[in-house]
Image (cartoon, rainbow, N blue to C red):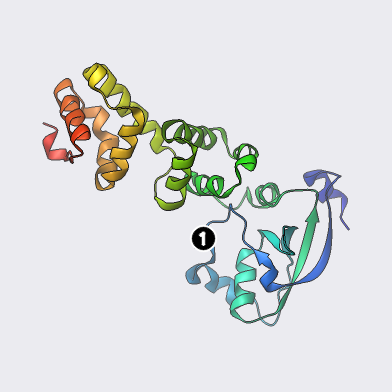
Amino acid sequence: MSNNKDQMQLGAHITWEFRELQTEQLKPCRLQPDVRTDTARLSSLNSQIRNQILHPIAVVPSKNGLYTIADGHRRREIASRRGWATVPCQIYYGISAEDLWVVLNAGTARLSGKHWFTGWAKCAQKERKHFLGLANKTIRGSIERMVHVFGEKRAEEIALFEWVPPHAAHHIGVIYQLLLKYCKDKAPTERQVGEWLLAKRTRFSDMFSFPRLANARNVRKLCTAMHSGKDFLRGQWG
């Protein structure tokens, strides 16, 4: 079932077995970036695989007879495109797909904060705390900050439908503090600052540099723009 070296890395309580599984039984891990299985990323591996997959796909049992892939998403995609009904799999027991993904891919796959943010949003609420525990401190703090600013439900929507990295929460906080400093009780809430930035996303990157150039006059003009829902172009900062 397992060898001593692998058990030292994964834990002695984790076991596995080899078995052929139906290709359609395999679903992607929440942590896996979608771009890893696009045609351009598959070309090199596709040329190496001839008549069969030699290296088993690492999976963890899921619900309804399905299995979540921890390693081997591209192999599975190639098998599906070639119409292969089954693929060789190494089925792990006693570990979640996300934990196994981190163990097997931490040294080779570089996940951005956005990928972690999306993975967090795809988790059931009771799984989210554990999921964040797999991320590094910086990414975990950024996602928690997004939840603090927008609330959990809205943060989930942003993660799934907006291409906004979680570290944006830091910039929102910096701009909010400037508004509090110069506009006092007239300042919008931190949530309103974030929503304005999302609505004016074409200016999002510009606003990251705003704090370096901010003065009382600029900040008050920004405050007025936010309350009125208007844009605040870089040319207006003078």
Where residue 76 sits in the image (x, y, percent)?
64, 70
Where residue 30 sits in the image (x, y, percent)?
59, 53
Location of residue 89 by image quarter: bottom right
Please tell me which residue is depicted at 18% across the width and 23% down the height of the picture.
215
Please tell me which residue is depicted at 22% across the width and 18% down the height of the picture.
182
Q: In this view, does 32 lie to the left or right of 181?
A: right
Which of these two is toward me, 232 or 33? 232
Q: Which amino acid does label 1 sit on?
A: Asp
Where residue 130 sits in the image (x, y, percent)?
65, 38
Which of these two is toward me, 61 or 10? 61
Please tell me which residue is depicted at 22% across the width and 20% down the height of the picture.
183
**SS for dot 1:** helix
- Label 1 sits on residue: 34
Which of these two is toward me, 165 or 162? 162
Which of these two is toward me, 216 or 74? 216
Q: In this view, does 75 lie to the left or right of 142?
A: right
